[in-house]
Image (cartoon, rainbow, N blue to C red):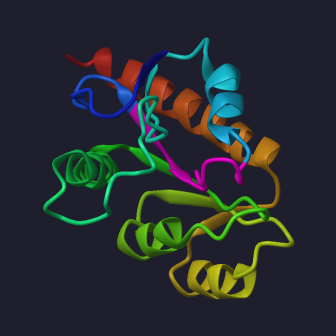
Amino acid sequence: MEIVKPPTKFDTTNKISIFLAGSIEMGTAEEWQVQVQDALKDLDVLILNPRRDDWDSSWKQEKSNAPFREQVEWELKGQEHVDLILFYFDPASKAPITLMELGLFHEDAVVCCPEGFWRKGNVDVVCEYYMIEQVGTLEELIQYAKDYVSAALEFEAYFEKFE
């Protein structure tokens, strides 16, 4: 497994890739990304984790602020180019950016929005409307990712026989 965080550049062309979209809110949201990474550590997969190690909460969230803009563009590019996006809505967070991203990048996504998330009803309706796969727990989200990677690797191996 390879883990890439912003602002590090990445290439998703030669490896199965997963973006960890979801609650980050420093000090509020659990660090669920670590649980996913630990569970997938033995798989040949590229993980894009937007939880930036050197995030500075004093950065003005304005497009003219270079580090902030770099973060946002890294996340947009990542979600545009990965094979699978895991959305996790931590009930302890508000996750407004994650809500927006679900609207933008729902086609290659699986969503976990547990009971207690303040806008669970909205997320459930959007997922049903756009036929987005939903799971009930973080453990199920992790299992979905494992199954996805396994199936993708089997698919690749099958077609390598014909090259």
Instruction: Give the magenta-colored segment's residue range.
Output: 17-29
- Residue 90, given in percent of the width and then of the height, sits at 73, 59
- Determine the residue positioned at 33% across, 50% down: 75
- Residue 152, given in percent of the width and then of the height, sits at 47, 32
Query: Quick one: 143 or 6, which is closer to the camera?
Result: 6
Q: Which residue lies furthest to the front in this view?
A: 58
- Determine the residue positioned at 68% across, 21% down: 38
- Determine the residue positioned at 16% across, 49% down: 66
Query: Quick one: 154 or 33, which is closer to the camera?
Result: 33
Judge left or right: residue 138 versus residue 66: right
- Indicate the quadrant containing the C terminus: top left, top right, bottom left or bottom right: top left
Query: Quick one: 149 or 116, which is closer to the camera?
Result: 116
- Residue 85, given in percent of the width and then of the height, sits at 47, 51
In the displayed structure, 43 sits above or below 64; it is above
Judge left or right: residue 148 versus residue 64: right
Query: Toward which corner of the image does residue 146 lie, by quadrant?
Result: top right
